[in-house]
Amino acid sequence: MKYFLKLQLTLINRELVDFGIKPILGYLISVFAFIFFSHLFFQKVLYPEYFYIFFSLSILLYLNEKRRNDFLKLLYKNNEYFKIRVVENLIISLPFEIFLLYKHQILSVFLLFISSILLVFYITRNKLSFVLPTPFNKKPFEFNIGFRSQFLMIIFCYTITFISINVKNFNLGLFSLFLLHFIITIFYYKSEEKYFVWIFNQSPKKFLIEKIRTSIMYSLILSSPISISLIIFNPELQLFLTILGIQFLGVVLIIISILGKYSNFPSSSNPVQMFSIIFSISFPPILILVIPFLYMKSIKKLKYILE
Amino acid sequence: MIEIKNLKKSFGENLILKGVNLSFSEGNIIGFVGSNGSGKTTLFNCISGLEKHEGTITYSGGKLKNDLGFLQTEPYILNKITGNEYLQLFCNSRNLDNTDVDSQNIFDLPLNKFVETYSTGMRKKLTLTGILIQKNKVYILDEPFNGVDMNGNLIIREIIFKLKELNRLVLVSSHIFSTLTDICDLIYHVNNGEIIKGYTKMNFIELESEMSNSSVINSVSKLNLL
């Protein structure tokens, strides 16, 4: 068991190195980010402790994937397997429990502790046989995968829009539009295998333009139910202009996300992409520099695969 | 058609390909045999352009990768994509509009299901279908028979013969020696990053006895089985 857990730590360290930061720095940033976002969460959300437990358990679900557990069962004896899984779950839920304790949520700590142990007995299957149809079949790739992976989040956005129209709080609707565009940028976060770029007989420039064109077209399709319904139920010029502004911002985010991904291709995790998005949202004029910089870098990275 | 001169490839300090020189002409089926780790897949990756390398690879038809269909040993599969969408992606990559991918489903694959639910052999069949739809001039098939059922293997054999008939160049590797000797015009023996020798149809028996003598008996005796 000790060796397996040590190996997990080594894997996390390697991920951090691949991401471009030293492991110790990665851990420090993670601790500060965790404390900051937990505080923010407890300030902004109603009944935060329940959502907090739910969020913690949903992270643990990643360890319950069937193939991973089959592998562990084959490798270890039954009691050793359960020991590993319980220890893993307890380690991951520990920071959440400490923060709940700090917030004097003793019952929630107890609930999370028990749930994280019980969750060991629940195995998830990742091979779903149900194929969710999408309107993106002409150029199938990021949008088909993203739409199916983030389906619940997309439905959540549409639901918020519906509620915003019902309660006539159109700011909430605008927020759902922004959230949807942010979810779309996640479609482009992970780099594909080199092979799926290599098969294209396009120049790097044409490849990038085609990717951006497709993503803009499909993001407009995906966001149109929100923007159109908001305009229909509140046909005011100011709202219309704000929707246009958010759509424009969404397009810019996708462009940065695509360029960011290929600027560090074929590396799977990309700090350049993440920081570019954060900087661009907080200080939009920097886009004049960020976009050409990422574009040139992407062209350079794609050249050796496509030419 | 393709000329490879002094091809070298290393990963860190580990030299995998030690100056390979080869030339291939169209209408041929060229086989590559060698033990695991001998450098066959690295050679294919370099020819395809997926790996940077030293030395030159020239192709008389222009840009080789635009005419090349590459079936990798373990085709990488995208999650949450159906077989249909996967083939459509291969069509889009070559700007092939209005291709009816269903009609080209030669292996009767369940194209409306997620590719991640496919078995190893089915994934191979799907990727092979994809590169065939692209109508390439050169094909690299890295262990195409591995993991594929008997009927699928027979179809792949027929496909390779058809490609030869159409004057295409096919580079193929396999660990099933009899299959290679059945289909190839020429087989290269790869060992430790070097091309040891090329064998024509007349010398295939010589190659087989050379390979088995050098490895099988010594390897089994090392095991110390009780």
Image (cartoon, coloured by chain):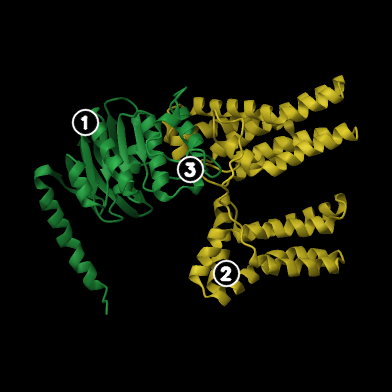
Label 3 chain ID: A
Q: Are marks 2 and 1 on the same chain?
A: no
Q: Earlier in the sequence, mark 3 or mark 2?
A: 2
Q: Which residue is mark 2?
A: A5
Q: Tell me whether the residue at label 3 lies in contact with that at label 2, contact meaning CB atoms closer than 8 angstroms.
A: no
SS label for mark 1 = loop
Can you give x and y, in whole percent of width and height, for residue A145 in the image?
58, 40
Can you give x and y, in whole percent of width and height, for residue A72 in the image?
53, 67
Q: Amino acid at mark 3?
A: Glu
Q: Amino acid at mark 2?
A: Leu
Can you give x and y, in whole percent of width and height, for residue B146 in the image?
33, 50
How many C-alpha atoms fall within 10 Å of the one at disc 2: few (<14), some, or many (≥20)? few
Q: CA distance from mark 3 to mark 2?
A: 28 Å
Looking at the picture, tell me which residue is in the foreground, B195 or A264.
B195
- Indicate the colour of chain A: yellow
Q: Which residue is mark 3?
A: A193
Q: Residue at x 20, y 64 (%)?
A: B216
How many C-alpha atoms fall within 10 Å of the one at disc 1: few (<14), some, or many (≥20)? some
Q: Are marks 3 and 2 on the same chain?
A: yes
